[in-house]
Image (cartoon, rainbow, N blue to C red):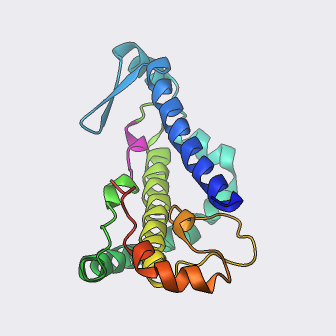
Amino acid sequence: MNTLTDLLERISVLEKELSRELAQRHEKLRYTIEEKKVRFSEEVRRHHRDMVTRFSDYVYDNGLFIVLTVPIIWVALIPAVFLDLFVFAYQLICFPIYGIPRVKRGDYVVVDRHHLQYLNWLEKVNCMYCGYFNGLMSYVREVAARTEQYWCPVRHARPVKSVHSRYKTFFEYGDAEAYRRELEDVRGRFDDVE
């Protein structure tokens, strides 16, 4: 195994370790997850309600210029919804033809922070937006990664800032023999996908 592939595998192991560590935090913060719903103890919920910032204080503390940027942020929701619909249709039509397992949107788009009692209504709306938008970008990235694995599973010559989940299966840049010899195998290598 080459060094780059080994490093990518180690990153994958660390991501799983991070998930386990985050799961252990649930107990420390005294909440459980039941059927995708978070449940806090009554004592914690009461404490959270006491921590809410009044809307007027929240707006005042953030300042006028921050408030004026809100429409710019929210207008991005329009193309995001179209992107969401397009990627859903793309996956529904193309992935079965390519033999690529579908990406579960709900694994990426998680909107749950609006249930936190210590957030005021505007913070809750902002959290819903961010959960949707950032989750959508992660979902789209995974769909694109699986597509790239099928059509062009070749690593870049130059380093990239952040690699996606499928990059570890890609061929080394310039390795023509491996590409021609193993392309069909790599196109179908999704055994690590749940």
Q: Residue at x 45, y 53 (%)?
A: 131
Q: Residue at x 56, y 63 (%)?
A: 168
User: Residue 6 location, x and y as percent?
Assistant: 64, 54
Q: Is residue 77 visible?
A: no
Front residue of this view, candidates 149 and 78: 149
Q: Is residue 47 left or right of residue 176?
A: left
Front residue of this view, candidates 178 and 24: 178
User: Residue 105 location, x and y as percent?
Assistant: 33, 61
Q: Residue at x 67, y 61 (%)?
A: 2
Q: Is residue 32 left or right of residue 163?
A: left
* Residue 88 belongs to magenta span: no
Q: Is residue 6 left or right of residue 179?
A: right
User: Residue 34 location, x and y as percent?
Assistant: 26, 31
Q: Residue at x 30, y 77 (%)?
A: 95
Decide: is 84 above or below 23. Answer: below
Please provide the residue range marked out in magenta: 110-115
Q: Is residue 67 visible?
A: yes
User: Residue 127 location, x and y as percent?
Assistant: 48, 49
Where on the picture, by quarter, is residue 36? top left
Where on the picture, by quarter, is residue 49? top left
Front residue of this view, candidates 104 and 159: 159
Decide: is 37 above or below 170. Answer: above
Farthest right residue?
Answer: 158
* Residue 114 belongs to magenta span: yes
